[in-house]
Image: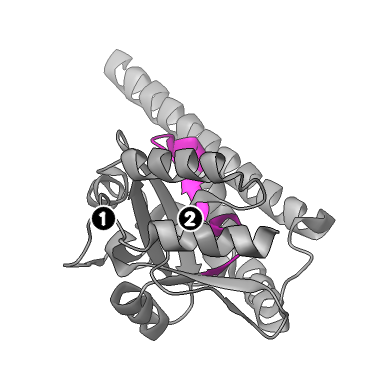
Amino acid sequence: MQIIFIVIILLLAGYVIYLHILITKHNIFIESIVKRLTGIEMNWKPDEMKALLSELHKFNFRSILFNDKLFDDKILDFILENEKDSRIYIHYTKYEDDAKSIMSHGFRFVDSFYKTALPISNDKLDIMIKHNSRKYFGNYVIVLCISNEIVKYCIDEMEKAGLKNFYFENILTEMPPVKNDNSDLEFLLPVQFVKGYINHSTGEIFINPDFNPLYFSSGLKTNIDRLREIHQ
């Protein structure tokens, strides 16, 4: 009887831990939804809102715990491999063709990464919160990685040039920025800073053979001069 009693206690303890994990993940999910509905994502397109509503309709605890591969060891190892000496960003997209295009041609962004890409570090809770707030944009996660050495060089050079209204990523492009339909400056990050992409639903990893976080663009000086002209 004593052995049976101990087994029952262990089973109950395990069930309590399981429920605690469910509640924690549920709260994180609800937090991400509340942030959206209170104004953080005011610029959503209709199809993005439909994706969110669809995800809410399908939401269940089992899908969060077992169907998402982002937190598998091999996935996190791939994403965070260069974390000690680089800045890492993730960007979500719905279609694999778009992911392949970014890996082949570079990452296009307006003004700054921070509008469409999330900075991450070796903090699983932070990654979980950010992932739950963005995974509705698609199953494909683009991984961007830029060496701290390159970042520091860009920031130092921009400070010397007096460029205060731009970001370091603005001078990494090898092509002149162009204005889009909204008259915003659009930049293209070189393909060397795209590490690859993953499918967070299946756990597949696609590595960019041209990835080089230490890539030094020969156009940095030209970009600084160009942005100085824009800034004046």
Is 152 situated above or below 56?
Answer: above
- Amino acid type at mark 2: Glu
Residue at 64%, 82% in the rendered image: 180
Residue at 22%, 50% in the rendered image: 74
Q: Position of residue 114 (x, y in %)?
A: 58, 55
Looking at the rendering, the stretch of residues picked out in magenta corresponds to 109-126
Q: Position of residue 69 (x, y in %)?
A: 34, 57
Marked residue nearer the N-terminal end (2 or 1): 2
What residue did someone put label 1 on? Answer: 215
Taking depth in this image into account, of 161 and 87 the one nearest to the observer is 161
Taking depth in this image into account, of 104 and 37 the one nearest to the observer is 104
Residue at 66%, 67% in the rendered image: 56
The secondary structure type at the circle numbered 2 is helix
Q: How many marks?
A: 2
Is 86 situated above or below 203?
Answer: above
Classify the position of the C terminus by image quarter.
bottom right
Q: Is residue 120 magenta?
A: yes
Residue 168 is marked as none
The secondary structure type at the circle numbered 1 is loop
Q: Position of residue 49 (x, y in %)?
A: 71, 75
The crowd level at tag 2 (other Cα within 10 Å; few <14, some 14-19, many 20+) is some
- Amino acid type at mark 1: Tyr
What residue did someone put label 2 on? Answer: 169
In the picture, measured across the screen, residue 87 lies left or right of residue 213, that is: right
Residue 172 visible? The answer is: no
The crowd level at tag 1 (other Cα within 10 Å; few <14, some 14-19, many 20+) is some
Q: Image quadrant of residue 36? A: bottom right
Classify the position of the N terminus by image quarter.
top left
